[in-house]
Image (tube, grey):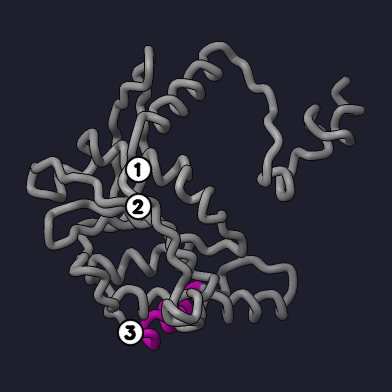
Amino acid sequence: GNVVHVLADEVASGRTPADLDVLMERLDSVWNGLAFDAPWKSEQEKDHARAALERFLHWHVLDRGGRAPAASEHDFDVTLEAGEYAVRIRGSMDRVEQDAEGRAYVVDFKTGKGAPTKDEVAAHPQLAVYQLAVREGAVDEVFDGNRPEPGGAELVQLRQPAPKKEGGEAFPKVQAQEPLAGEWVSDLLATAAGKVLDERFTPTTGTHCSHCTFRASCSAQPEGRQVVE
C-alpha cells in the first residue's frame, strides 16, 4: 500500500511518467526489500499492486469534469473550532484537485480489501475533516493564496474495480462525499475532544469490530468482558 501511494504521488507531481512499464520498473526495484511470509504471498501481492497501479493510471488520465491535480501528499496543519474547543488537526492529503470553477477536491487513495457503504461514505469522518480543513485554509497555498470552496472529497479504492457502468475492472471504485452540509463534523470533533480531555474512552461497537485486533480484550465484547471484569 505504501509503495503504491509513493508511485501515485510521483505520477501526480510529474516526477514519474504515467506509464505502467515505468511504474512496474520502479516497483521491481524495491519489491525484494519488502518482507512477506512466503514467496507465493509476495507474488500474489505484486499482482495486486500491478492491478492497483493500472487502475490508478486509468483514473489519473480520465477527464473528471475538468479536474486537475493541484497538490500531492499535501501536508496541512489547521486549528478548527469545534463547540467549546479549538482542535488542531495535522495530516496529509493524498491528492488535492481543482476543477474549472476553482473548487477544491480531496482524494484519498485506499489499497485495502474493504470499502465503506454509501451511507458510511456520506458520514465518513476522515473525508469530512479534510473538507473542513479546506474550508479553514488547509490548501490556500496551492490555490495561490486564495480560499477555495470545497467541492467534495472521495475515496479511490485502487484494489477494487469500479461497477461495470463506471468502467469495470480497469478502473478503481470511487466513493464520493458531497460538500459538507450542517455542523455534524464539528459536533463529532467536539465529542472526540471532550472524551480525550476527560479521558473517557468507552468502547463503541460497530462494523469496525469485525477486524479489530483488541476484540478479545474489549469490554464491549462477550469474550473481552471476561478479561477486564
Count up the numbered dots.
3
Identify the secondary structure beneath mark 3: loop
Identify the secondary structure beneath mark 2: strand
Residue 160: in magenta span:
no
For the residues bearing labels 1 and 2, Cβ distance under 8 angstroms? yes
| Comes first in the chain, label 1 or label 3 | 3
Identify the secondary structure beneath mark 1: helix
Quarter the C terminus occupies = top right
Furthest residue to the right?
226
Residue 57 occupies which quadrant of the picture? bottom left
Residue indicated by mark 2: 153
Residue at point 31%, 68% (across, down): 10
Find residue 130 and name its label.
1
Dominant SS type (magenta) = helix
Judged left or right of residue 67, residue 102 is left
The alpha-carbon separation of the residues under discs 1 and 3 comes to: 29 Å
Amino acid on which disc 3 is placed: Asp
Q: Which region of the structure is painted magenta?
A: 19-30
Task: Give above or below for 226 relative to 207.
Answer: above
Residue 152 placement (x, y as % from top left): 31, 51
Residue indicated by mark 3: 19
Find residue 190 and name its label.
none
Task: Give above or below for 227 relative to 13.
Answer: above
Between residues 65 and 155, which one lies in front from this camera angle?
A: 65
Residue 203 placement (x, y as % from top left): 69, 28
